[in-house]
Image: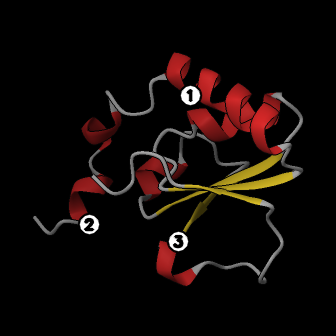
Amino acid sequence: MSHLQQYEDPKYFVNIGDEEVNKERAVWLSQEFHPKRALELGAGRFTLTSALRRLDVDAYGIDVSSEACKFAPDIAIQALCQQLPFKDQIFDLTIAFDVLE
């Protein structure tokens, strides 16, 4: 199994993206940076991206995994961090928690 194939296994996402931790992170990010538009890299289950949206941030997440993107299809974009499908400087906050492990 290649290192990218593991992310296509639905079991990989069972313990990723602690919802309570990400709610706290979202509040902190919102209060500290006041983002209008945010991008989460390696969003996993998209719990942080979703928490930011509940705080009225126009947030989106990307993940390499099609399985991960199923958690939040309305805000998920399947892509590599090296090949972002966005114009430059459209996000005022970019987040990468738990990506470089």
* Amino acid on which the number 1 mark rests in the picture: Asn
Please provide percent x and percent y for residue 5.
23, 63
Q: Residues within 10 Å of mark 2 (few under 14, many from 20)?
A: few
- Circle nearer the N terminus (2, 1): 2
Q: Residue at x 51, y 54 (%)?
A: 96
Residue at the (76%, 49%) spot, across then down: 59
In the rendered image, which quarter contains the N terminus? bottom left
Q: Which mark is residue 79?
A: 3
Where disc 3 sits, the SS reads loop
- Within 10 Å of disc 1 (Cα), the crowding (few <14, some 14-19, many 20+) is some
The residue tagged with tag 1: helix, strand or loop?
A: helix
- Please provide percent x and percent y for residue 12: 27, 41
Q: Is residue 81 left or right of residue 36?
A: left
> Which amino acid does the dot numbered 3 rest on?
Ala
Few, some or many C-alpha atoms within 10 Å of disc 3 (few <14, some 14-19, many ≥20)? some
Residue bearing mark 1:
22
